[in-house]
Amino acid sequence: MPAEDDYYQEDLKELQSRYPGDRFISYCLPPDQGLGGIKVRYIIRVVSRKHAKEIDARQGKAIIEALQWLRDHPDQHEQPDPSNMEAADDTRK
């Protein structure tokens, strides 16, 4: 069975073949620092300034769209008020 590091190396090789010439930085959190024992690995792709500007513009547009959707659909993401939960349960009886 291949070691876990072998899987990471395979992932990096795949990324490098998909994006030749780009640089990748990989970092794994120590096992005791993951949330609830989850293994956490960061892979950062270093791109040119021009490409970074394109990515920033796409991300900015996506964030604006998400915020507009949240504004237009407020009832779909509101959390129930815990103080009203008992009253709601009482009416169902």
Image (cartoon, helix red, strand yellow):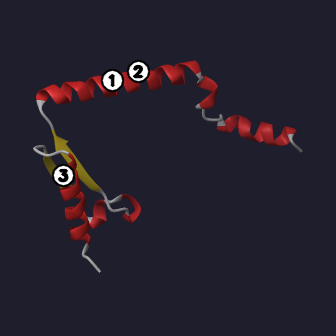
Residue sitting at the far right? 93
Residues at marks 1 and 3, CA–CA distance in whole angstroms: 28 Å
Q: Residue at x 24, y 59 (%)?
A: 11
C-beta proximity under 8 Å, tags 1 and 2? yes
In this view, the residue in front, 49 or 69, is: 49
Q: Are marks 2 and 3 in contact (CB under 8 Å)?
A: no
Looking at the image, is 77 positioned above or below residue 20? above
- Number of residues whose C-alpha sits closer than 10 Å to that of mark 1, classed few (under 14), some (14–19) or many (20 or more): few
Residue 77, image x and y in percent?
58, 31
Of marks 1 and 3, the one in the foreground: 3
Q: Secondary structure at mark 3?
A: helix
The image shows residue 88, relative to residue 31, as above or below, that is above
N-terminal of the pair, mark 2 or mark 3, is 3
Q: Position of residue 86 (x, y in %)?
A: 76, 41
Q: On residue 64, which mark appears? A: 2
Mark 1 vs mark 2, CA separation in Å: 6 Å
Residue type marked 3? Ser
* Quadrant in which the N terminus is drawn: bottom left
Horizontal relation, residue 1 to residue 63: left or right: left
Q: CA distance from mark 2 to mark 3?
A: 33 Å
- Residue labelled with disc 3: 17
Q: Tell whether 52 sits left or right of 36.
A: left
Residue that carries the numbered disc 1 in the rendered image: 60
Q: Quadrant of the C terminus?
A: top right
Q: Nearer the viewer, mark 2 or mark 3?
A: 3
